[in-house]
Amino acid sequence: DLVDEIVPGSRFDEVVAGRLAEFAAVSDRPADATGITLSYLERRDAEDSITYPYLRIEIDRELRTARLLMEGPKATPPPDAPAVVAQGDSFWPLALTRALDDALLHLRMNEPELATLIFTTEGDPDLVADYDSFLLDHSDHWLVREVILYIKRTFKRIDVTSRTTLALVEPGGCFVGFLAEPVFASDRSYMLEGPVDPPEAEPRIRLTKMNLGPLPMGNGLTRLATRFWGRDEALEAVAGLVGKDLDATEAEAAGLVTFALDEIDWDDEIRILLEERASFSPDSLTGMEANLRFVGPETVETKIFGRLSAWQNWVFQRPNASGERGALRSYGTGQRPEFNRERV
């Protein structure tokens, strides 16, 4: 039962072509549809920054952080699904997701010592909500469906990253709908509390139906269901907040953010947070965070990426715990352990 069919070599190509034709026949994609061209991704690299359309990354080498600022759309959604095809890869959700996907892979491969990814947003919350509604209303269109699936796959990269993830909900942000998912995916989230000038820039979080199903994690649950695992009443209460702008007090009371801080404490608390994360054993953080990110059903994805990759394929292979200058052998000696700071 490990394979579906055994085919002789003389008929292999014929059978494969036949199976492909069968699958294509039941697809709802129009046979005469024209695809879109994914143009070369525009990216400008500097020593400590990376800039894409709709995404800016600032790297702090001393604190070993990367701040990813995701920008909201500049215009309203297209009028219909065919207009999305006409826009091609400039369609805002697709353009942003391509940039985020590339950025996460770039940081994984080329910045192994970065310890913390910080997610922030900037833009018009109402425009983001309009795009969220557009994606849901046209989810039966082949291209819109592929964009939603691409968003889902890209956000899964955040779920399984070996880095600490933080979300900062600050004035002028647009954590709305699918763009709010990094808040729920992050190990910790902080939201600024209190009045700001101008009042319309006050930090808000707004849930949409996009947060309730279309973007599951590797465990098959939404990030909200994962966050409220075992607390069904709290999850139902959060589902009732769809469409409402939540300030810091409301978001913290609903359990949507880890901490709500006022302006007096904000800078110091964030500074201390980043400094302590940079000082901890990177392997202990990787293992601990992997343990806490996934709950509920054990799937093929979570068996591999939920804990196995972090512990058996990484922590147990490294000297930070039991090496000559690791944490265990240094304990009680008065000497500080020496850590390999790479997180990838």
Image (tube, rainbow, N blue to C red):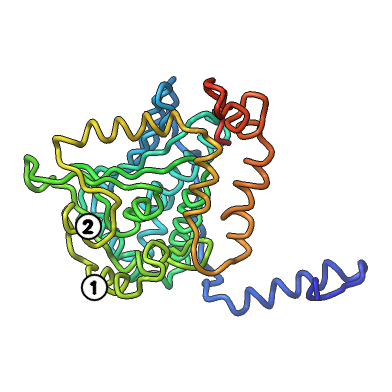
Label 2's element? helix
Q: Amino acid at mark 2?
A: Ala
Q: Count neighbours of disc 1 (C-alpha within 10 A) and say few if under 14, some if 14 to 19, many if 20 or more.
A: few
Residue at 28% of width from left, 60% of height from top? Answer: 255
State if disc 1 and disc 2 touch (CB < 8 Å).
Answer: no
| Kind of residue indicated by mark 1 | Gly
The quarter of the picture where the N terminus appears is bottom right
Q: Position of residue 178 (x, y in %)?
A: 35, 58
* Residue tagged 2: 251
Q: In the visual, does 326 lie left or right of 123?
A: right
- The residue at the point 52 percent across, 34 percent down is 282
Tell me the residue at 18%/64% (across/down). Answer: 244
Farthest front residue? 332
Which mark is nearer the camera, 2 or 1? Answer: 2
| Residue 22 picture quarter | bottom right
* Viewer-side residue, 61 vs 4: 61
Please state which of residues 321 and 11 is positioned toward the viewer in this rendering. Answer: 321
Q: Which residue is mark 1?
A: 240
Task: State left or right for residue 320 relative to residue 121.
Answer: right
Query: Which x, y percent locates residue 164?
Result: 45, 41
Classed neighbour count for the residue bearing mark 2: other residues with Cα under 10 Å, few (<14), some (14–19), many (≥20): many
Residue 241 visible at all:
yes
Q: Quadrant of the C terminus?
A: top right
